[in-house]
């Protein structure tokens, strides 16, 4: 049986099952897309989960690099319409249909290699920005094409929104990352606030709030820049991006309201809040 993008139905079913099993709201959020675009986004998400799991799972760096190298080889086949597993075949078809760029897939793998080795601890601002570009902005550049807009303005949305989302994730996951020996807050700002680079010590430092406030301010500025860029894009194509931006901006607001003293208190958006945002931005 043929599925959207000319795919074998079994390949699309396997990728869809993987996305659904991840237990993410992404699965339901992307169901508003037309079938071909939805298939492409499921493939992009599944790819990101695969390479992210390689980076995060226990194992030595050599083994992780070898596993990521396998995906580099698979990515090289996307533009040729070649795929050796369901995710690769979905993405090969999506690449042909939506002109997805090989360099964006490779940038995501580069970002995973940054996480695969020694824990990232207090990177300088330039390295943090490069990390955000690889693990978030590159995903955005793929996504806007799958959504239906390949313009320079759409790439500007990806640039700003990807950074905003990743900085929000960094603030949300401070405690979880510290437990893994990671600290993604920038070295220059930590030093200015007198915060040590050791992840556990940093979370207890009196100056942590000043650093987090600066990250939050930068994330908010990126959300505003993304909104401005969206105004120049295809409105229908940007519906999923608007929803993601609104959802994460609301999450950032809740993080700022909670503050940086009780990082053990999780911050989430309730189901009704998410539904309201979806209706407000024309996704439902």
Image (cartoon, grey):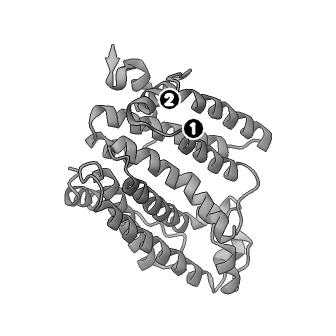
Q: Secondary structure at mark 2?
A: helix
| Contact, mark 1 vs mark 2 (Cβ under 8 Å) | yes
The mark that comes first in sequence, 1 or 2, is 1
Which residue in the structure is indicated by mark 1? 50
Could you say which is closer to the camera, residue 246 or residue 226?
A: 226
Picture coordinates of residue 15, whole percent (x, y): 44, 30
Who's the residue at 67% across and 37% down the image? 68
Q: Secondary structure at mark 1?
A: helix
Who's the residue at 63% across and 65% down the image? 128
Q: Quadrant of residue 188?
A: bottom right
Could you say which is closer to the camera, residue 80 or residue 132?
A: 80
Could you say which is closer to the camera, residue 74 or residue 59?
A: 74
Picture coordinates of residue 237, whole percent (x, y): 28, 48
Q: Is residue 17 visible?
A: no
Cα gap from disc 1 to disc 2, whole angstroms? 9 Å
Picture coordinates of residue 43, whole percent (x, y): 45, 34
Q: From the viewer's perspective, is 211 left or right of 68?
A: left
Who's the residue at 77% across and 44% down the image? 61
Q: From the viewer's perspective, is 7 left or right of 279?
A: right
Which residue in the structure is indicated by mark 2? 87
Picture coordinates of residue 268, whole percent (x, y): 40, 63
Q: Is residue 127 visible?
A: yes
Question: Dot 2: few (<14), some (14–19), or many (≥20) neighbours within 10 Å?
Answer: many
Total numbered badges shown on the rendered structure: 2
Q: From the viewer's perspective, is 36 left or right of 172?
A: left
Which mark is drawn over residue 159? none
């Amino acid at each position: 049986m043929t599925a959207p993008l000319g795919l074998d139905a079994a390949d699309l079913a396997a990728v869809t099952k993987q996305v659904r099993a991840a237990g993410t709201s992404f699965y339901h959020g992307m169901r508003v897309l037309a079938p071909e675009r939805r298939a492409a986004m499921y493939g992009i998400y599944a790819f990101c989960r695969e390479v992210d799991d390689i980076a995060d799972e226990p194992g030595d760096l050599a083994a992780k690099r070898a596993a990521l190298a396998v995906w580099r080889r698979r990515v090289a086949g996307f533009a040729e319409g070649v795929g050796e597993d369901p995710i690769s075949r979905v993405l090969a078809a999506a690449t042909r249909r939506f002109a997805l760029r090989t360099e964006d897939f490779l940038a995501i793998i580069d970002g995973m290699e940054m996480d695969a080795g020694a824990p990232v601890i207090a990177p300088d601002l330039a390295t943090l920005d490069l990390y955000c570009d690889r693990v978030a902005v590159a995903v955005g550049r793929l996504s806007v094409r799958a959504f239906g807009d390949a313009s320079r303005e759409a790439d500007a949305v990806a640039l700003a929104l990807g950074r905003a989302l990743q900085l929000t994730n960094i603030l949300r996951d401070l405690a979880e990352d510290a437990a893994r020996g990671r600290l993604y807050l920038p070295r220059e700002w930590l030093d200015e606030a007198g915060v040590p680079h050791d992840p556990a010590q940093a979370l207890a430092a009196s100056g942590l709030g000043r650093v987090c406030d600066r990250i939050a301010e930068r994330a908010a500025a990126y959300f505003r820049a993304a909104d401005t860029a969206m105004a120049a894009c295809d409105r229908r194509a940007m519906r999923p991006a608007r929803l993601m931006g609104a959802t994460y901006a609301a999450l950032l607001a809740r993080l700022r309201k909670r503050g940086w003293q009780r990082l053990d208190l999780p911050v989430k958006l309730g189901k009704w809040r998410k539904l309201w945002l979806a209706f407000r931005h024309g996704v439902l």
